């Protein structure tokens, strides 16, 4: 899956440090990232290559001994201490341009090599979204300040503390004898078969999310809900929790056409998807096919 980067090791312990000349710098502009290709592999700029750029840097994480930092626009001194100024992220032009580098859509992280570089990129984008959307306090609108001991932003005026936002969501493999339920999303770029999925709501257990999402999207009851595996899925800012369960009662599908384009029961022989070594959904479908 996307997070499986062995033998490389991802270290996300927070460190209050500044970048060195050879550390990697992630620069995002809307849903694009600044990269170049070297031998068909993604490369990010180093601090040395950013020497002409004025910006702030936030330490993100390390992979093995390589450190990754986020470059953040340096909002000028006229920037108010309150949330009335437009963010630099909303500007049409990126705040960094480097020779030999280009901005690519973050969807490249699904398929680009090396795998650990792609994982670093999408994880950095998740963190970038968090920093970007929490520049100002949601309670009193003052400027937020990074904490020095842990990954947290706090408000010096009202003491509001904001931790990174991760949204739990379920992926559900509904089994009916020798068949599994597969579906296609409505109105999305991803057009292959997938499994039922949805975000956990406040006040419910993850098992309750499983039962609710299956009922909402295809009108089926399920039983025997069993946890399988999880995966960080930064494309949607989520932590995905995979569950298998069994159909309980009628197998007649009532499709929620706002969410799904189609859904149906498939036997093992009818599944013609390959393992993409990226998504938990795909791994679960093939787990059923090969069981
Ligand atoms: Zn505040």
Image: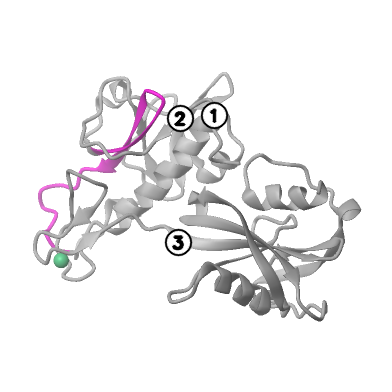
Q: Nearer the viewer, mark 3 or mark 1?
A: 1
**Disc 2 element:** loop
Which residue is tagged 1? 6
Give me the residue at 58% from left, 29% from top. Answer: 113
Report if the CB atoms under discs 2 and 1 are less than 8 Å apart. yes
Report if the CB atoms under discs 3 and 1 are less than 8 Å apart. no
Visible residue check, residue 63: yes
Q: Quadrant of residue 248?
A: bottom right
Q: Which residues are magenta?
A: 57-82
Mark 1 packing: few (<14 Cα in 10 Å), some, or many (20+)?
A: few
Q: At which x and y percent is residue 190?
A: 67, 55
Q: At which x and y percent is residue 18?
A: 21, 31
The reply to whether the magenta stretch includes residue 60 is yes
Which residue is tagged 3? 167
Q: Earlier in the sequence, mark 3 or mark 1?
A: 1
Q: At which x and y percent is residue 96?
A: 33, 36
């Amino acid at each position: 899956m996307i997070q499986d980067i062995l033998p490389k090791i991802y270290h996300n312990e927070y460190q209050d440090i500044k970048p060195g000349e050879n550390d990697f710098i992630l620069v995002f502009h809307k849903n694009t990232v600044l990269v170049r290709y070297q031998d068909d592999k993604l490369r990010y700029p180093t601090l040395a290559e950013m020497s002409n750029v004025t910006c702030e840097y936030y330490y993100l994480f390390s992979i093995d001994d390589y450190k990754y930092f986020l470059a953040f626009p340096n909002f000028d001194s006229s920037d108010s201490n309150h949330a009335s100024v437009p963010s630099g992220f909303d500007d049409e032009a990126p705040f960094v341009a480097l020779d030999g580098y280009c901005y690519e859509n973050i969807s490249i992280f699904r398929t680009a090599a090396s795998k650990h570089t792609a994982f670093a990129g999408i994880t950095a984008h998740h963190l970038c979204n968090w920093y970007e959307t929490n520049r100002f306090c949601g309670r009193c609108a003052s400027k937020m300040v990074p904490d020095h001991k842990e990954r947290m932003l706090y408000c010096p005026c009202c003491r509001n503390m904001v931790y990174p936002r991760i949204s739990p969501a379920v992926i559900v493999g509904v089994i009916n004898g020798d068949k599994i339920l597969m579906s296609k999303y409505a109105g999305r770029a991803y057009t292959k078969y997938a499994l039922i999925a949805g975000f956990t709501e406040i006040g419910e257990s993850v098992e309750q999310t499983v039962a609710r999402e299956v009922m909402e999207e295809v009108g089926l009851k399920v039983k025997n809900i069993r946890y399988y595996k999880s995966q960080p899925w930064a494309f949607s800012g989520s932590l995905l929790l995979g569950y298998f369960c069994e159909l309980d009662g009628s197998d007649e599908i009532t499709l929620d056409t706002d969410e799904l384009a189609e859904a149906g029961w498939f036997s093992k022989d009818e599944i013609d998807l390959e393992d993409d070594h990226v998504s938990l959904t795909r791994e679960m479908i093939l787990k059923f096919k090969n069981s």
